[in-house]
Amino acid sequence: MEVMGAEDPYIGLSLLTQHSFDLVILDLTLPGMDGLEVIPKIREHSSIPIIISSARDDITDKVIGLERGADDYMPKPYDPRELVTRIKTILRRTASSENPKKAEEEIFKLDHNSRIILFKNRLLDLTAAEYDVLSVLITHRNASVSREQLLYESEHIDDDSSVKNIDVIISRIRQKIAKIDKENIYIKPVRGVGYLLTTNL
């Protein structure tokens, strides 16, 4: 397991928009924001599994945490092996419920070698910059991606470009997708962050 830590809840929330994670382990006693307040902020943009790991063993905290969207609650102290077991159990459960991901992959097919993207088995006529942006969104499907991340992960966009250029590129990609499917919006804005590509329509 590869772990990335964040001592500050605001940094943690920012990391969730910049990277793709499988699971969050959340403490409740945090600087600047109570852990129970972090859960709904995560749930605004992500359905990622959350395990609360806290020295606070009050039943009220547990109930509130689970009601707000946490998947499990582990009061400290506990054997680390139990945490690993619970992580594996939750990931197995989410993996089985994510088998529709095959359907997602059928909608957007990404070929890095030939740098082409198929949408509903039809080739999208994309510029190099549009390919870069859409490929990042597909890689992070169903998770919000910041404009800055789209800018910096794109090989064919000038480093000096404004993040507003991302909005223009997104608009062009949407228009090309709409030529194939004008009934649905697959790339959605995430207020204050950037964009999210979803096939859960």
Image: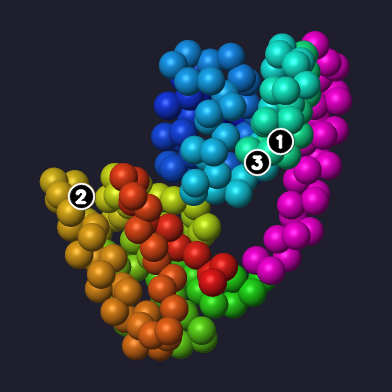
The amino acid at mark 3 is Gly
Q: Nearer the viewer, residue 115 or 46?
A: 46
* Label 2 crowd bin: few (<14), some (14–19), many (20+), radius 10 Å: some
Indicate which disc residue 66 carries.
1
The amino acid at mark 1 is Leu
Mark closer to the observer (1, 2) = 1
Residue 80 covered by magenta stretch: yes
N-terminal of the pair, mark 1 or mark 2, is: 1
Q: Are the residues tagged 2 and 3 within 8 Å (C-beta)?
A: no
Mark closer to the observer (2, 3) = 3
Q: What is the quadrant of residue 133 in the picture?
A: bottom left
Residue 144 covered by magenta stretch: no
Q: Are the residues tagged 1 and 3 within 8 Å (C-beta)?
A: yes
Q: Give the alpha-carbon distance from disc 2 to disc 3, as whole Å.
A: 32 Å
* Label 3 crowd bin: few (<14), some (14–19), many (20+), radius 10 Å: some
Q: Is residue 158 in sight in this rendering?
A: no
Above or below for 16 versus 110: above
Q: Is residue 66 left or right of residue 36?
A: right
N-terminal of the pair, mark 2 or mark 3, is: 3
Residue drawn at 49 percent across, 48 percent down:
45
Q: Give the alpha-carbon distance from disc 1 to disc 2, as whole Å.
A: 37 Å
Predominant secondary structure in magenta?
helix
